[in-house]
Image (cartoon, rainbow, N blue to C red):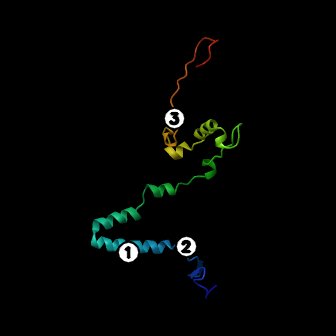
């Protein structure tokens, strides 16, 4: 309530604000003022920090990625040996590779190699044998 400011919150422009939450606009304003002062002393360094802190980069785009989390995250259903990955590591590894969101991790159209998660893989060519008694290799 008004008159109790600073106890556990602050009143700003008719809104109740928590004093423990950082005011990002004030921080940006202070950073810009500091960078402008730095530009007067050392223009190259000031320009570097302005580009580094205030220009959009690939990290900004990655953080704004819009996707439905339920479509991306899949939960391990378990195996006949047990519900945990430790119960059947081979089954878990196969399940994990099959359920990787390849388009989000490696980009659309790219072939995933799974080396970043420690998996080893190789191409296996299949050969059809004309003999009926022989199995397909």
Q: Secondary structure at mark 3?
A: loop
Q: Quadrant of residue 84?
A: top right
Return the residue at label 3: 120
Badge 3 or badge 1: first in the primary sequence? 1
* Residue drawn at 42 percent across, 57 percent down: 57
Q: Which residue is mark 1?
A: 33
The structure residue drawn at horizontal position 56% and vertical position 44%, both measured from the top left corner, is 101
In the rendered image, residue 128, in percent from the top left (x then y), is placed at 57, 17
Mark 3 or mark 1, whichever is nearer to me: 3
Badge 2 or badge 1: first in the primary sequence: 2
Vertical order, 102 against 14 (above or below): above
Judging by the rendered image, the residue that carries numbered circle 2 is 21
Element assignment for label 1: helix
Side of 22 relative to 40 (left or right): right
Of labels 3 and 2, earlier in sequence is 2
Q: Using the numbered discs, state the Cα–Cα distance from disc 3 to disc 2 in whole angstroms.
A: 46 Å
| Distance CA(mark 2)–CA(mark 1) | 22 Å
């Amino acid at each position: 309530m008004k008159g109790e400011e600073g106890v556990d919150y602050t009143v700003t422009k008719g809104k109740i604000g928590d004093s423990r939450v950082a005011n990002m606009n004030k921080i940006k304003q202070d950073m810009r003022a500091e960078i402008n002062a730095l530009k007067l002393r050392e223009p190259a360094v000031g320009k570097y920090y302005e580009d580094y802190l205030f220009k959009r980069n690939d990290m900004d785009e990655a953080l704004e990625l819009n996707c439905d989390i339920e479509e991306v995250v899949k939960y391990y259903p378990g195996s006949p040996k047990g519900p945990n990955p430790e119960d059947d590591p081979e089954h878990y590894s196969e399940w994990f590779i099959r359920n990787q969101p390849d388009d989000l991790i490696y980009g659309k159209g790219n072939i995933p190699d799974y080396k970043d998660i420690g998996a080893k893989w190789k191409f296996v060519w299949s050969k059809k044998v004309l003999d009926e008694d022989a199995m397909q290799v």
